[in-house]
Amino acid sequence: MTKLKTVVFIIVCFVFLPVWAGVESLPHPVIPNGFGVNIHFTDEPRDLDMIAAGGFNFIRMDLVWSKVEKVKGVYDFETSGYDALTKGCVRRGIQILYILDYSNELYESDRSIRTEAGRKAFAAFAGSAAKRYAGKGILWEIWNEPNLKHFWSPQPSAEDYCKLIEGTVGRIRQADPTGQVVAGATSQIPLDWLEECFKRGMLKWIDILSVHPYRSQAPETVIADYAKLRELIKRYLPPEKDMPIISGEWGYSNLNWDKSRLSEQEQAQYLARMFLINHYQGIPISIWYDWKNDGTDPNEREHQFGTVRHDLKPKPAYQAAKVLSSTLAGYSIKQKLDLGDEDDFAFRLTKGQCEAIVFWTLGSRHEVTLPLEPTEVTLVNMNGEKVTINWKTGNLKLRAEQSPQYLQIGPENREIPQATVRSLPK
């Protein structure tokens, strides 16, 4: 049976917090500070205005070595478009995750780095980039999906990848003490591959671990995978060191892995739930792949990931992100609520003295009961449309539907019965 999903939010009050303060690389852990999108452009197109307006506070973009260094030892960040992109993001309060990636035929013959000369040249390039954009709170990620042959040819090598990290980290930190170094960036969450990297010392060198939790299943299935990953990290993490996990790339195409179709409405629901589940799991940054459709071929999977179409016309996913980001701005999830059904997800959120509830169902459409006293509320759907609701008896009964809904109430009803809460997973 196809599972239907609904998200309902109960909002007490509304405020935006800054996306990033000064030179801090990780955002404050409130919605929507860690929400972002992958992009595939440089310079300063109007996309950046739409990204900011949609509630996305991060972009993740390749800073391609071969585009910057076309002559040995000469780094061109201006005509390659990275100067304009960086300035455009800073001007709009959008934080940047730059992927220092891919090979350069000046030094390496394959799409990988396997020689000492190549490693030294890559480190010099990374240091030059970090120096140029120092002080802007940029996250510096080393490579993209090195566990795939497509991105590390002719064959992925944890040993070679770790040698690259070890030789690059120092140059980045020296050039930009305010930035943080990200690595891993794995396709999905391959525990065996990551353990090979951990054994070689990767967790000692980096500040943040990135994974790309792609899956054909619903976003909630990632919870078990994060638990396994955290257990693995504990085995290799140096004492007294913290290791944040970020979701550096994850999205759902309208053309599934098995070539079946995912409707634009379903894609929008997955986007909202992905951001919420990642936030619940303590993931400080969640990057949706992709900002816009990379082409117009309906039969090309890579052309169907966007929150907007190739011509920048918004898809339902864009509106879902915009409504979620504005409606829950400043809130963070504190506790999981138990509604009596394992298919129902419910969370208590707080913002100072204000409180909210978010919940949805993985089952078929059905009525759910929220632990609230009678009052007047405003129901906001995924498109931002509103309706007023009154009820006179104890608790609030609502129908869980496929599309997200947001329920705003007055501050006099902000108290939530504490007997129904569970602690967040560690």
Image (cartoon, grey):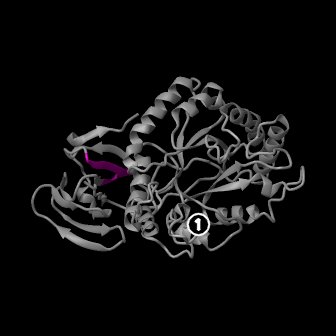
Q: Residues within 10 Å of mark 1 (few under 14, many from 20)?
A: many
Residue found at the far left of this picture? 393
Question: Which quadrant of the view contains residue 202?
Answer: top right
Q: Quadrant of the N terminus?
A: bottom left
Q: Position of residue 388 (x, y in %)?
A: 23, 72
Q: Which residue is mark 1?
A: 294
Q: Horizontal placement of 412 versus 148: left or right?
A: left
Residues in magenta, as a range: 343-358
Is 348 magenta? The answer is yes
| x and y, in percent, of residue 290 in the image | 54, 61
Residue 233 seen: yes
Amino acid at dot 1 = Asp
User: In the figure, 201 relative to 135: above or below?
Assistant: above
Q: Nearer the viewer, residue 215 or 210?
A: 215
The relative height of residue 217 versus residue 171 in the rendered view (above or below) is below
Residue 279 locus on image (x, y percent): 43, 48
Going 58% across and 71% down the picture, which residue do you hit? 49
Q: Residue at x 20, y 40 (%)?
A: 419
Q: Is residue 83 left or right of residue 41?
A: right
Res 352 seen here = no
Viewer-closest of 3 and 182: 3
Quarter residue 156 falls in: top right
Q: Is residue 86 magenta?
A: no
Foreground residue among 117 and 399: 117
> Does the magenta stretch mainly form a helix, a strand or a loop?
strand
Left or right, residue 279 beside residue 196 = left
Closest to the observer: 380 or 5?
A: 5
**Label 1 secondary element:** loop
Using residue 65 as the reference point, say whether residue 262 is left or right of it: left
- For the C terminus, the image quarter is top left
What residue lies at 83% left-to-right and 39% top-to-bottom? Answer: 120
